[in-house]
Structures are given as C-alpha cells and as structure tokens.
Amino acid sequence: MRKMFLKGWRPIFVLLLLFFMWEIIVKKADIPDWLLPAPSQIFAEGITGWAGFSGHVLATIKLGISGFAIGVGFGLLVAVLLYVIPFVREAVYPLLILSQNVPVIVLAPLLVIWFGFGMLPKMIVITLVCFFPITVAALDGFKQTAPDLKHYMRMAGATRQQLFWKLELPYALPSIFSGMKISATYSIMGAVISEWLGAKEGIGVYMTLASSSFQTDRVFVAIFAIMALSLLFFGVIILMERLLIRWQLKGGE
C-alpha cells in the first residue's frame, strides 16, 4: 500500500501538467468556451453546478451497481455452466466471442423497440457490457487449477461438487476478480449508454442536455465524473480482492 502511495504522485503530476498546458493553450489561442473550455472553467462549473448535478450522479451510481451485480451473477453462472458441461462450452463459447463484435450502442435502439423505455433495456445493456469479462476470466481461472491438487482430492474421495466448491472455485478467485475489475469500469459506461435510451436522470441525460445546448463545460464535467466513478468502482473491487483472498496475495509476494 505504501509503495502504491509513493508511486501515485507520478500520474497525478503528469495529469496536473496536462491540465496546466491545456489551460495555457486555451488562454493563449483565445479558443471560445463553447468549443473548448479551460480546465479552470470546467472545475468551476463542477463546483457551482454540483447541487443540480449530484442527483444525476447518484442515479448513474444506482443503475451501474444494479447492472454490475446482475452482470457478475450472470457471467459467473454462464462460466460455471460452460466449464461443467464441455460440449456446451464447445458450442456456445465461439458465439459469445462473436457477440462481442456487435457494439452495444447499435443494439440500444432495438432494445427500446423490443422492451420499451423502462428499466429492463437499461439492465440488459449493462449486463451485456459486464458479463463477458467475468465469463472469460472465470473460465480461465477454473482451467488453471493445479492438476496435482485435483488428483490429490480425487484420491481422497472428493466428489465432483466438492472438487469444484473447495478447490476450483477458490483457485479461480484471482481471475474472477480480474474480470470484475474490468466489468466495474465498464458498468459506468454501460449505465451512461443505457441512460440514452430514455431515462429521466443520470449522467447520460445530463451530458445529452449539455451537448444539445452547447454547454461544453458541463459535458466535460460529465466526462470527468464518469472517469472518477470508474476509478472508484475499480478501487472498491481491489479492496474486496485484498480482503477476500489475502492468502493468494501473500503467497504471490
């Protein structure tokens, strides 16, 4: 943790340098605010407009967490089924990979046509974004279980269910958390995309209204909020990983 803290100043320094250069270029080139606002104007808008923006942030957080939970659960279920039933894996896994070549933003209008403007199409969008990294990571984790340990448990008389719950699943936890980290960052993006399907509040709605009225500073406020929430979700998953699989982390050190 201390090493991460000591190294953390480097990206922060680079980020501050980029903001400084951005500020100077906008001021010196006299770029219009509606085209490219200065960082100082963006941060000022974020502070002064927080009262109206906070409700949109909370709506996106709730939507993202709900979709992430459903996506993780569905992804783990699919991974277990594909791992336990080999012929299903051989038939379905290529189709899962093929499905990821279809952009979610293209499917959004179809989901509205099929399911309307309610909560269901929004949950489907976030689930589609989140479940694939979990499924792939969990499958890889199951396959990486040490053969010697599996052989030892079979020699001890362990059943197939005991082998999975007591060895293969715990052994796959680091891989599962790796997939969860990716899905956690995707969940916010998926929530924002889903809010374009007709939501009444959320960062996606806020961004759409701001861009249509050429309030570019508010658009950047929304972008920075999405980035911050993605990093926050990512950090929460890292904390959960450190709490739940300390034995694995200590063994790796």
Image: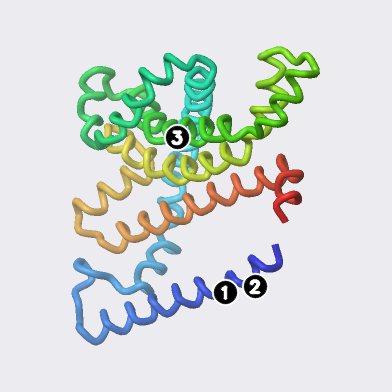
Position of 154 compared to 184: left or right? right
Q: Residue 143, position in %: x, y? A: 56, 31
Residue 63 bears which disc, if any? 3
Which residue shows up at 50% across the image and 36% down it?
A: 137
Given residues 83 and 216, the one toward you in this image is 83
SS for dot 2: helix
SS for dot 3: helix
Q: Residue 93, position in %: x, y? A: 38, 25
The residue singled out by tag 2 in the image is 6
Q: Amino acid at mark 2?
A: Leu
Which residue shows up at 44% across the image and 40% down it?
A: 187
Q: Amino acid at mark 1?
A: Trp
Q: Residue 189, position in %: x, y? A: 38, 44
Q: How packed is label 1: few (under 14 Cα within 10 Å), some, or many (20 or more)?
A: few
Q: The N terminus appears in which quarter of the rendering?
A: bottom right
Q: How packed is label 2: few (under 14 Cα within 10 Å), some, or many (20 or more)?
A: few
Position of 178 compared to 126: left or right? right
Distance between mark 2 and mark 1 Cα atoms: 6 Å
Which residue shows up at 66% across the image and 34% down it?
A: 146
Q: Are marks 2 and 1 in contact (CB under 8 Å)?
A: yes
Q: Please name which of the two marks, 1 or 3, marks the residue nearer to the observer.
A: 1
The residue singled out by tag 1 in the image is 9
Given residues 170 and 87, the one toward you in this image is 87
